[in-house]
Image (spheres, rainbow, N blue to C red):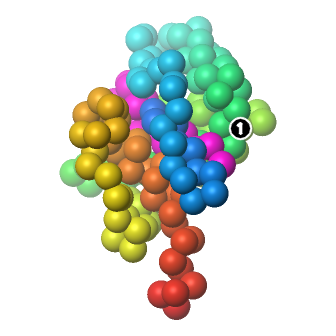
Amino acid sequence: MKVCGVEINSNDVNVCLLSLTDEIFELPDFRSRRLTLTDINSTRELRYFQQTFAKLMQDYQVDRVVIRQRPMKGKFAGGAVGFKLEAAIELISDLDVFIMSTTDIKESLKRNPIQIDYAETDLKVYQEVAFNTAYAYLMKDKYAAKDA
């Protein structure tokens, strides 16, 4: 299964492609690490962002997009632009999108710690949250039955 982990930060969307086949993880080559909405007030730019994201997912045959959920209120609440980008991604037809809470991500990572040092992945520092989101999603059910 190919999963694209997504972290939305202001007008940037950090992405990480992660694949799991026969219990083996792979970080396939991916032509984009970050997509940016350059003009937050332009409908044309938002549509361009949406088309670019959709084309990227289609080209790499992504099975599911997993977006790290952001709080709606409080100190760390997501901004309006972030929610606009999230909606643009969710509204892409033929794209399977899943929103994963930070609590679920933390629980999955606690049950299934990452077995490699992040520095060895050759990903950029700003992609770490997207990577953790994709990894946590792929591992979320691995030991759920054992814990029950």
Measured as percent of width and height from the top left, residue 128 is found at 32, 41
Q: Residue furthest right?
A: 94
Q: Is residue 96 above or below residue 123?
A: below
* Magenta segment, prevailing SS (helix, strand or loop): strand
Question: Is 115 displayed left or right of 101 in the figure?
Answer: left
- Regarding mark 1 in the picture, which secondary structure is present there? loop
Q: Which residue is mark 1?
A: 95
Instruction: Say which residue appears at 69% left-offset and 43% top-offset.
Output: 63
Q: 35 or 69, which lies in front?
A: 35
The range drawn in magenta is 1-14
Q: Residue furthest left?
A: 75
Q: Is residue 29 above or below residue 39?
A: below
Q: 109 or 66, which lies in front?
A: 109
Measured as percent of width and height from the top left, residue 102 is found at 38, 59
Quadrant in the rendering for residue 87: top right
Question: Is 15 displayed left or right of 94 in the figure?
Answer: left
Q: Residue furthest bottom?
A: 148
Instruction: Say which residue appears at 54% left-offset and 72% top-offset.
Output: 142
